[in-house]
Image: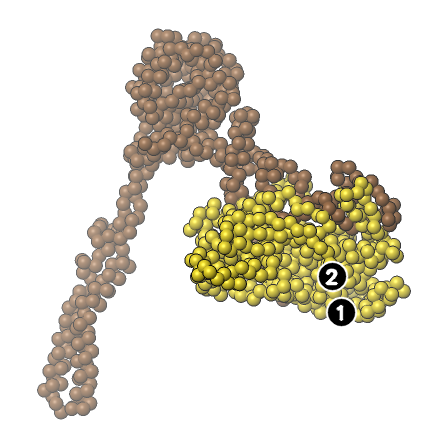
Chain colours: A yellow, B brown
Amino acid sequence: MTAREQKRQPLSTGSEWTFELIQAYDREISRLAERYALDTYPNQIEVITAEQMMDAYASVGMPLGYHHWSYGKHFLSTEKSYSRGQMGLAYEIVINSDPCIAYLMEENTICMQALVVAHACYGHNSFFKGNYLFRTWTDASSIIDYLVFAKQYITQCEERHGIDAVEDLLDSCHALMNYGVDRYKRPYPISAEEERRRQKDREEHMQKQINDLWRTIPKSADKVSEKDTARFPAEPQENILYFIEKHAPLLEPWQREIVRIVRKIAQYFYPQRQTQVMNEGWATFWHYTLMNDLYDEGLVTDGFMLEFLQSHTSVVFQPGFDSPYYSGINPYALGFAMYTDIRRMCENPTEEDRRWFPEIAGSDWLSAIKFAMSSFKDESFILQYLSPKVIRDLKLFSIMDDDQRDDLLVPAIHDESGYRVIRETLAAQYNLGNREPNVQIWSIDRRGDRSLTLRHQQHDRKPLGDSTEEVLKHLHRLWGSISIWKPCRATKS
Amino acid sequence: MSYVIDRRLNGKNKSTVNRQRFLRRYRDHIKKAVEEAVSRRSITDMEHGEQISIPGRDIDEPVLHHGRGGKQTVVHPGNKEFTAGEHIPRPQGGGGGGGRGKAGNSGEGMDEFVFQITQEEFLEFMFEDLELPNLVKRHLTGTDTFKTVRAGISNEGNPSRINIIRTLRSAHARRIALSGSSRARLREAREELARLKREEPDNFGDIQEIEAEIERLIARINRIPFLDTFDLKYNLLVKHPNPSSKAVMFCLMDVSGSMTQATKDIAKRFFILLYLFLKRNYDRIEVVFIRHHTSAREVDEEEFFYSRETGGTIVSSALKLMQEIMAERYPANEWNIYAAQASDGDNWNDDSPICREILSKQIMPFVQYYTYVEITPREHQALWFEYERIGEAFPDTFAQQQLVSAGDIYPVFRELFQRRLVT
């Protein structure tokens, strides 16, 4: 009874938003988030129109992108499907930067704005700040500066060398963008200012080294040193763009710099590609928790809550495999289910949970999910935390499609004997290493025709897609010399 | 701490450049689509954009990805009837969720990339490589109107245009320059005087001498005039030729009995095309409609295209009327005059030489461009041959073409206004 009396006035009753209201909601949500000790970057909430949202879409969420036709293509298709009502726009876009920039759309109701504030400004934001991949691979404080530098540099190149030359180069780099990522080395965070200064030195220094590698002055012919016959690179290189930037024989300094820019941006997006389920699940979990807390304190009305639940359920809706709406596993649904389940296992563990997750069953839920958020990526997160209950709830099953057999096999379903198999299969499905063909630079012919040999480690006989030929043409353009394809069946150890 | 920022007023067209880049890259595709659209759609609805579709494979961005095949194991949600170890037949067509492998992510099935271009862009592509003949010439030679524009500062001018700031600045600079050495010596003398007074207060001779020197120097500095005629600066105004940006378009059409509604429709499309084209080049454009059979009349648009009249044909009546209207309302030094004449080529044979006479003497010298389209599948008659002679006399400003069907309009239009290489 006392709790009910203590209930405060709701912050708003209508559905219209104002700047004051957004701020009031933000204040309350921030207060609640502090209760859970969510560690976030400062927030910068920007209210934009639908057209601006489409712009933001087109530049893949980068607040400032260099100019390229492919962004125009994105924009045109977004614009078309939006104006025909085939597609609603995302309610929000959030950028991994410090301060963390979140876009709210003008058309939304105050309920949606509050949801987005909770989802983006406290959910995604704390994920960006907490997850180890983001901490290692991206530097939130310098990304905006770097994008400014990149945009200016590319504009300058366009002025100096013509739009076509730059566009061709960017096309080629984009084709190999997913192979421009360092998986093991952490790049140093540097500011745009420094980047500009360094870029000058780098140009000169690099050109010198490349010339050295490709020196054609004959050495004393009688003794071919061991160094000359050794394979180069000594180890296969997975970061193809990096290799091109450093060793391609015919690129101009400015071209190397552009390769570098594309590579850096690929690196910046690399963690996002690996943490879809975790990131969206985390943000969804927190908007759900925070909005319910607001309701419990009487700060929002029943109508507000119904509107919220309506959009929340549509976000976490997972259509079955046979539904016409099915397009793979919904990362929001899977992530939300998993975090919610971790909390459940901590608070109300069953006998099964104690058997499967002895280390978290009955422990403090907040530190358990924070640990889960900070120390994993999708693959390992699923491998670690996908519980039998979530598998049962989602009725997960696997299908093996072997092109050498006439029918499909169902290796495992959501039963006692299948839990582990499902978990491993699903985890592998989120492993970028499995999702993308394993292609590496194998060697270059330094003494001969400078040809570049690539090696594809085939896994489970999966062939390469049909645009491979085109990608090779792009690689050829960058390398400037012949590239050879060397398929190779992986020997799985 | 959170900041809420209102960005709604920021530019919304951040993607414009990228959009332009896209259009630029696929301009051949778009141009083809526009050309098809022009011949397909009625010219009256040129006033909106167009949907362009480009084959999906032409705009794909290639990446390395897995194709179908091999052994692929995928987890799906929503199991209903399957049990572990069960064999199920492979779904045909791969449409339903079950059989779809990872390759589904790569964007297959997008056959056509469809998007909208605006009317502006549509016209841009439509009139690309087309040019109004003699536009430049008129800008250079036909400049009878001028406007005065500011053109910096000058040393000479009218007292009412004095630029006070620049004048005083220059006076100040002159005073500093001319008094420089005197002031330096004055400073030295004053120091010397102070020293003498401090160290040799009894040395009256020197002190007096220096005091006299100081007075002399001050007087010299004061003699430098505060303002000299030399300092005066004036705002300079120059006359710039003001190219006439008004155009008038004369539409002349034969409405005699031999012109059917279909022929008139073709003519109408041609006129509209010309109108749209002129509109892109001139701020202000007026249209004069003149219809004629044996006598000519100036009419409004509705009547021009749709009212029915019959009778014989005397083309020169329309030319005479045009000449009168030109003389009365559109002096050639103020207006860029364009004329388009449509006819089926029928004319009283005796009249055709008169037409040539009027055209070459009274009309051609004043117009920017005169186009004649003959809408007929038949042999040319006297009028065409007379006009050919005009074309020889005014090769830059006169053109004639023959139209047979509506499909010819656009190609003929392009031919008439094809950008000509400057020779």
User: Spatial distance from mark 2 to mark 1, Cα to Cα?
Assistant: 18 Å
In the rendered image, the vertical position of residue A136 relative to residue B25, given as above or below: below
Q: Residue A460 location, x and y as percent?
A: 73, 50
* Amino acid type, residue under disc 1 in the picture: Ser
In the rendered image, the vertical position of residue A453 relative to residue A3, given as above or below: above
Q: Is residue A192 visible?
A: no
* Amino acid type, residue under disc 2 in the picture: Ser
In the rendered image, residues at marks 2 and 1 fall on the same chain: yes
Instruction: Specify the label residue A15 is tagged with.
Output: none
Find residue A116 and report its image quarter: bottom right
A293 and A351: which one is in front?
A351
Which mark sits nearer the N-terminus, 2 or 1? 1
- Identify the residue at horizontal 28%, vertical 59% (top origin): B165
Q: Quadrant of the C terminus of chain A?
A: bottom right
Residue that protrudes farthest toward the left in the picture: B205
Q: Specify few, some or many for label 2: CA neighbours under 10 Å numbering under 14, 14-19, or 20 or more.
A: some
Q: Specify few, some or many for label 1: CA neighbours under 10 Å numbering under 14, 14-19, or 20 or more.
A: few
Of all chains, the one bearing label 1 is A
Q: Quadrant of the N terminus of chain A?
A: bottom right
Element class at badge 1: helix
In the rendered image, the vertical position of residue B221 relative to residue A393, given as above or below: below
B239 and A440: which one is in front?
A440
Left or right: where does residue B291 sit relative to residue A21?
left
Residue that mark 1 sits on: A367
Q: Is residue B375 visible?
A: yes
Q: Residue B184 location, x and y as percent?
A: 19, 75
Q: Residue B199 location, x and y as percent?
A: 18, 91
Residue that mark 2 sits on: A380
Q: Nearer the viewer, mark 2 or mark 1?
A: 2
- Identify the residue at horizontal 60%, vertical 65% (top origin): A186
